């Protein structure tokens, strides 16, 4: 049986780790290289670094960060944010990243997934998906998405891009199925509704995506207690669980979490 993975996520802005609630109210959470090294020592299975500013200046900052992380961290790590071309992917991988995460760029140009998978292998291409549950009209009338889709039921989720600021109108399940067919080798799935709330992962969303795609799914958004990880990895069907503030502010240790999961008969690497 494959082991389940625990993955700290470091949102990086201007060379610093930041964390917020529902994608806003950001506060400083430390140096990304020091944080990454600490998580590696504590037993994290992988790391995710997301450049949330992604300007040209930030791109140079992140390239330097990737190089420094690669020198000091000996577990796989993924880098995303502002990666728009195969050349962008290549430059970050050359600095030492193991995987590339794409979100908005793949929405705007889905062929980027195929091009990246052809160049580096599907195992290197992580599709990040920011999902929000669709809202219904109080009178029950159908919902029309921004791309013209019409939904007559409330259940389901819509894809957002640009750091959760723009509603694409795309259905989450349709998008992940298409993305995997193009070459995405993993899905990093964030519930915008649950993000930063510490009320638990969106298990319905996670299970729906896990059932829809043939690739690993990383659950993200909402972790607040050890039990939330257990539920995501069992009820939610996730292959990995990602968290940020819970780890950054030392509210939960990775080894403590893994020992708990092993006690719950969930296969993890200690």
Image (tube, grey):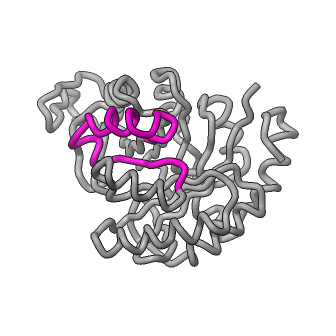
Residue 106 vs 65, above or below: the answer is above
* Residue 24 position in % (x across, y down): 38, 66
Q: Is residue 15 magenta?
A: no
* Residue 67 position in % (x across, y down): 53, 68
In this image, 59 relative to 110: left or right? right
Q: Is residue 125 magenta?
A: yes
Image mark count: 0
Residue 199 vs 122, above or below: the answer is below
Q: Residue at x 51, y 31 (%)?
A: 204
Residue 155 in view (yes/no): no
In this image, 2 relative to 49: left or right? right
Name the dominant secondary structure of the magenta segment: helix
In this image, 159 relative to 13: left or right? left
* Residue 94 position in % (x across, y down): 47, 57
Residue farthest left in this picture: 148
Q: Residue at x 59, y 47 (%)?
A: 200
188 or 140: which is nearer to us? 188
Residue 161 vs 53, above or below: the answer is above
* Residue 77 position in % (x across, y down): 58, 54
Q: Which residues are magenta?
A: 97-126
């Amino acid at each position: 049986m494959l082991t389940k993975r625990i993955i700290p996520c470091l949102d990086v802005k201007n060379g610093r780790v930041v964390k917020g609630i529902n994608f806003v109210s950001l506060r400083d959470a430390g140096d990304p290289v020091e944080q990454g090294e600490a998580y590696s020592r504590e037993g994290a299975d992988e790391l995710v670094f997301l450049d949330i500013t992604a300007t040209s200046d930030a791109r140079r900052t992140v390239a330097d960060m990737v190089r420094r992380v690669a020198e000091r961290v000996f577990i796989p790590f993924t880098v995303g944010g502002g990666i728009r071309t195969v050349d962008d992917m290549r430059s970050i991988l050359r600095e030492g990243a193991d995987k590339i995460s794409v979100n908005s760029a793949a929405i705007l140009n889905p062929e980027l997934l195929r091009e990246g998978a052809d160049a580096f292998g599907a195992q290197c291409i992580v599709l990040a998906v920011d999902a929000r549950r669709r809202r219904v009209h109080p009178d029950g009338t159908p919902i029309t998405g921004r791309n013209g889709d019409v939904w007559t039921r409330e259940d389901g989720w819509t894809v957002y891009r640009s750091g959760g600021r723009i509603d694409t109108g795309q259905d989450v399940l349709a998008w992940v199925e298409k993305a995997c067919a193009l070459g995405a080798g993993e899905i990093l799935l964030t519930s915008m509704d649950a993000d930063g709330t510490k009320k638990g992962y969106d298990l319905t969303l996670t299970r729906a995506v896990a059932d829809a795609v043939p690739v690993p799914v990383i659950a993200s958004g909402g972790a607040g207690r050890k039990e939330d990880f257990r539920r995501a990895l069992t009820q939610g069907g996730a292959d990995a669980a990602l968290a940020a503030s819970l780890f950054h502010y030392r509210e939960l240790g990775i080894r403590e979490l893994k020992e708990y999961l092993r006690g719950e008969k969930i296969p993890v690497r200690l």
